Image (cartoon, rainbow, N blue to C red):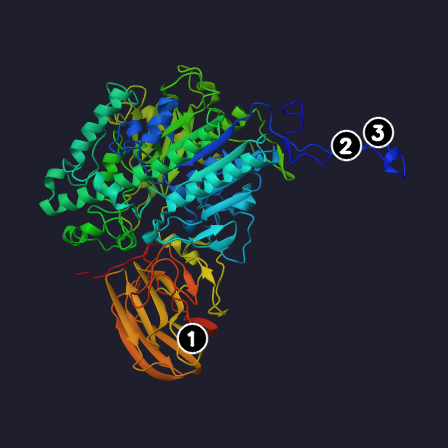
Amino acid sequence: MSDAHAGREHLPLPDPQYPSATSTDVREQTPPYTPAQPLTPPDGAPNVVLVLIDDMGFGAPSAFGGPCEMPTADRLAAGGLRYTRFHVTAVCSPTRQSLLTGRNHHSVGMGATTEMASAAPGYSGIRPHSAATIAQVLRHNGYSTGAFGKWHQTPARDVSPAGPFDRWPNGEGFERFYGFLCAEMNHWNPVLFDGTTPVEPSRRPEDGYHLSEDLVDQTIEWVRTQQTLKPEVPFFAYLPFGATHAPYHVPREYRDKYRGRFDHGWDRQRELTLQRQKELGVVPQDAELAPWAEGVPHWDELTAEERRSAASLMELYAGFAEHTDDQVGRLVDALEEMGELDNTLIVYILGDNGASAEGGLGGTLNEHRYASGIPDTAEFINSHANSLGDPTTHAHYPVGWALAMNTPYQWTKQVASHFGGTRDGAIVHWPNGIDERNGIRHQFHHVIDVMPTILDAAGLPEPTTVEGIAQRPIEGTSMLYSFNEADAPDRRRLQYFEMVGNRGIYHEGWMAVTRHGTPWEMVQQGRQYFDDDVWELYDTNTDWTQARDISAEHPGKLRELQQLFLIEAAKYNVFPLDDRMTERENPKEAGRLDLLGDRDTITFHGPGLRLTEETAPNVKNRSHTVTALIDIPDGGAEGVIVAQGGRFGGWSLYLHEGRPTYVYNYFGFREHKAGAAEPLPPGRHELQMQFDYDGGGVGHGGRAVLLVDGEKAADCRVEATIPYYFAFDETFDVGVDRASPVTDDYQEVNNEFTGRLQWVRVDLADDLCMDNENGQEKFRVAHE
């Protein structure tokens, strides 16, 4: 089409209209029919590569003064622009939904993560059709589109073989998808999807496999194929890494490179980072370190064991960050080899939220364990120092390092009120469209501004209808005005922030904020009322880092901004506020639809099924029975009948040396096992595990009884159970145990049941124990 905008406001464009036939013989047709030309983007529309790093703070990458060496980010910044006042939503799913739709996260139903969705419009976890994604818009305008990595935007109940698939990546505009849909992933043993088909890596960690490398291999292969077959068609490649979210999994040489580099501690690191940030010009020369979070120890307050464990976890994180950036470098090199680098708009966002404090004050070797209120001691972490980063660990660094990685700002991920949770580095590289090299841009921007920027760069209009649905206006502001005008006045002068009750409002440099919760207190104790929250006021025109609260000096300005927050929050579906954390992971408590609903009996036929925790039967905090009908061939059988979770927590029913066995793995600490004394003889058998839960709250113990053909074969006492979540990155598997194994009784691979599995049935009691008090879950567990 000659006119770049002609008809493109309504997508997809209508089918071409042909003149009526003028003859019964094609040779006599006047005028002769000619093939319709496929729609292409406007002339000069660039390729687009959108890279998103997970759980990285503003002060972590070297491109923004941090200690994590990221040479590709440095290279792209040297050839493009650094944006120093770029903001996200403070948590992953909301940032991703905003990034791809150009709308505020509550506007598109993602007020929290998909696992915390509720019935409220701003928190449903469901993108409205009236907010098409950038992939949909680009695809309908002739781009090739592919996504590779972490999605985390599909409603939790839809992540099953039954779908629906309309809000999977392929249903949201991406012609190719390879990655995972949940919050995090084991980088050594991932469970992935190719489109909507469950897949697993063809190689193992011992063969050199790593998820980040796999994602970039897939991206490069897709781009090369696309450019080979359709070199005239630009592509949109979305590369959202699972790194650097926990678990920190990285080849040993990357971890070892940083040995000893963090022995000076987090207080000194903040000073060093701020000094480097001033040298780079990404903060003003008069920028101050924001206040330290109350309750977090300073480095000199730690014991020698605590300093050693904390430093080793930071070494691990830094290596993880550099390894991830090296993979981005391979993609950049491939684009350069193809001759497409100069014509590619690369947006490299160094964090979907601020650095994460979800490892607790001391860090952990199993973040799921800490999320249930069980911390690891420094001595325990140090005893596993040689294993850090390998498949046997699921590590996360301490809060002190999260604060340091958010230098010079205060607070962390989840805290949408302060820049430590919302401000991340962003780099834009586009040699054909940006004149300056190594430029600094200080305009205030937000993640919702990326979609309109891409459309602007491609010369495409904002659509008014997509697939027959009228579109609500894009709420972002294009950043293109700043590409070649360093001192252009800000075009984003107003932005609200909210996450789990933490709130803020920015208006023309002024910012009013209130922190509602403490992000490392993963198990809530009692209710905090929103009206009791204390508001702070900052003038970021003179106080870049929110270092000085001036609410007492300007009460009128504070009231003005508080009223403005109410207006914006009402406009964008923020109300009613919802600060529930672990409680919302239970669909009944959250008030959202659940795939299995109130069903108390579910039968699975045959092996091979793979389900996420949200779509699997919920056996936690209740009595339940697992029954399997199996056939044993001559010579016996081995392997897994049904399993849930993995090395860091879960349960499994399997045959070990031919003997029926049930094991409950409590957070990787200890295994409770009930095993029959004799192997099963050939023939048909019914195995049953009856779990009698103690009741009285969450995380309590129970007794497991194993029956073979109706006769008791073994039993065991389980002293405590996993209360909230087995694992985001493990699955419920029938006939096999994928990813990491629940027990070392069988290996990571080739643990399939070798007999014939007729069916597995899970029966759930109706005594689900949540022990609510004032709307909050309580959990107590004694841990030695």
Q: Which mark is residue 31?
A: 3
Relative placement, left or right, of 107 versus 665 is right
Residue 656 shows up from this direction: yes
- Tell me the CA gap for discs 3 and 2: 9 Å
- Of helix, strand and loop, which one carries label 1? strand
The amino acid pointed to by label 2 is Thr
Image: 399 above or below 751? above
- Pick the front one: 335 or 769: 335
User: Residue 54, located in which quarter of the rendered image?
Assistant: top left
Q: Which residue is mark 2?
A: 34
Q: Residue 89: give x, y in percent of width and height.
A: 39, 36
- Pointer 3 and pointer 1: residues touching (CB < 8 Å)? no
List the residue tagged with mark 1: 627
Mark 1 is on which residue type?
Answer: Thr
Circles 3 and 2, Cβ within 8 Å, touching? The answer is no
In this picture, is 705 found above or below 393? Answer: below
Mark 2 / mark 1, whichever is N-terminal? 2
Residue 381 horizontal/vertical position (percent): 18, 51
